[in-house]
Image: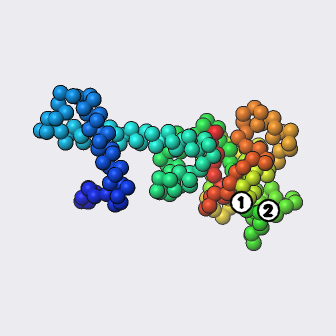
Amino acid sequence: MDEPETAPATAEQAELIRAVEQLAQDWIRTRNPATADDSGAGELRLLAVLKQIDEACQAAAARAAVAALQQGADFEDLGQAWGFSWQAASKRWGHLARGEQVAVVISRRNRVHRDGYGEVGGDDQYDADRGAWPVGEEVRRKARYALIAVDGIVQRVYEITDGWEPDQNSPKWHFRGKLLDVPEIAAAHDAGDLPLTPGDSCPTQRGRAYRPHWF
């Protein structure tokens, strides 16, 4: 069994711990002035209040994470700030930031890969855009639009008109739809059904060409 960590790693952490302990002691004196100096149960009261502070910090962190997402941060940014992976950040806070609608977002660099994937242009661009992608069942059921971002900027929008078809060589999926023109995109966006339009910033996220965008 691992022993609890008792020593801070840095002087800054030690200073922060002392500040938190002082906050807890002040809280105890404010709430229970008559028993604040009772040493018999003082450390247990301190432990109980530190538990409350820990829960309050978790709630404050969740609010900060949601606010950061609303201001344009992504889960990789949150993971870096908290000290873990984007997957863990998404698992920890993703449900708080989710809206009821979702769009499929494909982010890529402006290049062509050997297998024909990427910015191939012409009639083949539709097939390059539509998959295959590791899209989950809920997103396949709810998503009405797919957005294609190139070098961090939305370039194309598809309406998913005919659902999804499974890939023949992997557990991934291809959307089936039509490329929208400018008036159709504007109408969908004005109706609140489309979160981004061509020209909007949509940074490529390392290791994630595909991601669901809840809004």
Residue 44: give its label. Answer: none
The one of 75 and 175 positioned closer to us in this rendering: 75
Q: Quadrant of the N terminus?
A: bottom left
Residue 159 falls left or right of residue 88:
right
Q: Quadrant of residue 187?
A: top right
Inspect the image, locate mark 1, and give the three-letter code of the amino acid beneath it: Arg
User: Coloured how?
Assistant: rainbow
**Residue at position x 82%, y 63% from top?**
120
How many discs mark residues in the rendered view? 2
Residue 71 falls left or right of residue 161:
left
**Residue at position x 24%, y 40% from top?**
46
Look at mark 1 in the image and give the residue it sits on: 108
Look at mark 2 in the image and give the residue it sits on: 119
Element type where label 2 sits in the image: loop
Residue 104, horizontal then vertical, whole percent: 68, 48
Q: Are marks 2 and 1 in contact (CB under 8 Å)?
A: yes
Residue 12 appears in the rendering:
yes
Residue 208 falls left or right of residue 64:
right
Residue 121, horizontal then vertical, whole percent: 85, 61
Inspect the image, locate mark 2, and give the three-letter code of the amino acid beneath it: Glu
